Amino acid sequence: NAGVMQNPRHLVRRRGQEARLRCSPMKGHSHVYWYRQLPEEGLKFMVYLQKENIIDESGMPKERFSAEFPKEGPSILRIQQVVRGDSAAYFCASSLRTSGGTDTQYFGPGTRLTVL
Amino acid sequence: SQQGEEDPQALSIQEGENATMNCSYKTSINNLQWYRQNSGRGLVHLILIRSNEREKHSGRLRVTLDTSKKSSSLLITASRAADTASYFCATDPVIQGAQKLVFGQGTRLTINP
């Protein structure tokens, strides 16, 4: 049973370009979460999605960032017109179900975005 | 305000010694989880302790939770060089509809051979 998969592992973009980060959850998991980690800091929640639905995007910047989790295919975190401050590690996590509280979230290896 | 805050920020001990890391949080929680992150890598889930539990063990790991003090501790016994990593606590706050984890800044643990 493969774990959470993310690609690419490293992504370099110039200012103003678009970045697309992909996440395939663990088999059978229908809940996906995106987090961002700045150097020497903990992870900060960005967005929580279920298939075809954004459940909680309270941690997403209002502009330039969007996320989706289509019926088929991976979840995508999209950053338009990247700026240097977007440089960070972006982690995706998935969980099996919710049961009134958060179930264990399993994390992918992350995508390290560098904006030149 | 920061929910999970680890203490100490950095810890360096000799191989074989025990390592204790603490985490404090501010709001009521459903559960608290500890994760390990090796440098430049993803997070590995270590243990989850629910709000109605006080102590949990997994191998060389022992986690305690004191909801009255809003604090948790992670104890690693008989440390090994491979335990060198950053350790994060993550809380699941009791907020209707929320499913996000709130992470602390982490404790950087170094095990010296």
Image (spheres, rainbow, N blue to C red):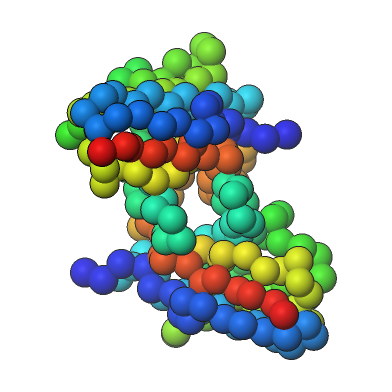
Q: In which quarter of the image is the C terminus of chain B?
A: top left
Does residue B33 appear in the picture of this structure?
Answer: no
Q: Residue furthest top?
A: B68
Horizontal placement of A107 versus A61: left or right?
left
Q: In which quarter of the image is the N terminus of chain B?
A: top right
- The residue at 80%/65% (across/down) is A62
- The residue at 63%/65% (across/down) is A88
Does residue B84 appear in the picture of this structure?
Answer: yes
- The residue at 61%/55% (across/down) is A39
Q: For residue B66, what is the image quadrant?
A: top left
Q: For this rendering, which residue is in front, A62 or A54?
A: A62
Q: Picture coordinates of residue A43 (x, y %)?
A: 57, 51
Q: For residue A85, what is the image quadrant?
A: bottom right
Q: Picture coordinates of residue A116 (x, y %)?
A: 72, 80
Q: For this rendering, which residue is in front, B87 or B94?
A: B87
Horizontal placement of B58 versus A48: left or right?
left
Q: Picture coordinates of residue B33 (x, y %)?
A: 41, 38
